Image (cartoon, helix red, strand yellow):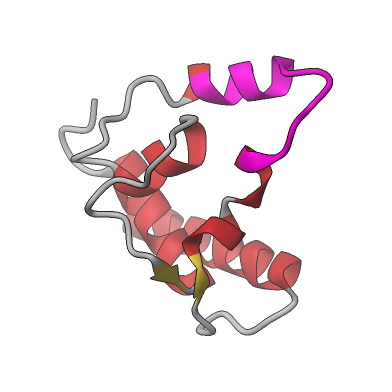
Amino acid sequence: VNQLLDILRHKALTQMAQESGGSATVRLNTLDWLGGQGREQADNEWHDAINWLGDWCSEEQHPVIWSTTQAAEHLPVRMPRLCSAERLSESMVDEIFQKGAA
């Protein structure tokens, strides 16, 4: 199981670093990573689907997943304001697959 989670972390890290056009360790403003949330969309069905997929998480226990899936005015207190692809990808996998999760 740990090996599969390591593979997933690596794939997420590679994808995020590639899409940001930077290094895996370069820290960017968290709102830049979450840029899609602030844009007006003519069709909000995709946003509703993402919200539904993340409705199991809580702001306190899953700050990265919550920030990624839920529309919010403010970031959770535990969500870092500067993040690297490495930090975000590891946190996402850990929050989703932690023991006793949702």
Nearest the viewer among 24 and 83 is: 83
Q: Is residue 79 magenta?
A: no
Q: Where is residue 73 shown, x and y percent of the image?
A: 43, 37
Nearest the viewer among 101 and 37 is: 37
> What residue is at 44 percent from the left and 70 percent from the top?
83
Q: Is 11 located above or below residue 61 in the figure? A: below
> What residue is at 81 percent from the left and 18 percent from the top?
43
Q: Is residue 46 magenta?
A: yes
> What residue is at 53 percent from the left and 67 percent from the top?
10
Range of magenta residues: 38-51
Nearest the viewer among 78 and 86 is: 78
Q: Is 23 located above or below residue 39 in the figure? A: below
Q: Is residue 83 left or right of residue 60?
A: right
Residue 1 in view of the camera: no
Q: How many badges with numbers are in the image?
A: 0
Q: Where is residue 100 shown, x and y percent of the image?
A: 15, 33
Q: Split into 4 quadrants, where in the image is the C terminus?
A: top left
- The part of the image, by quadrant, that contains residue 90 is bottom left
Q: Residue furthest left?
A: 100
Residue 60 in view of the camera: yes
Q: Is residue 102 left or right of residue 91?
A: left
Q: Residue furthest right?
A: 42
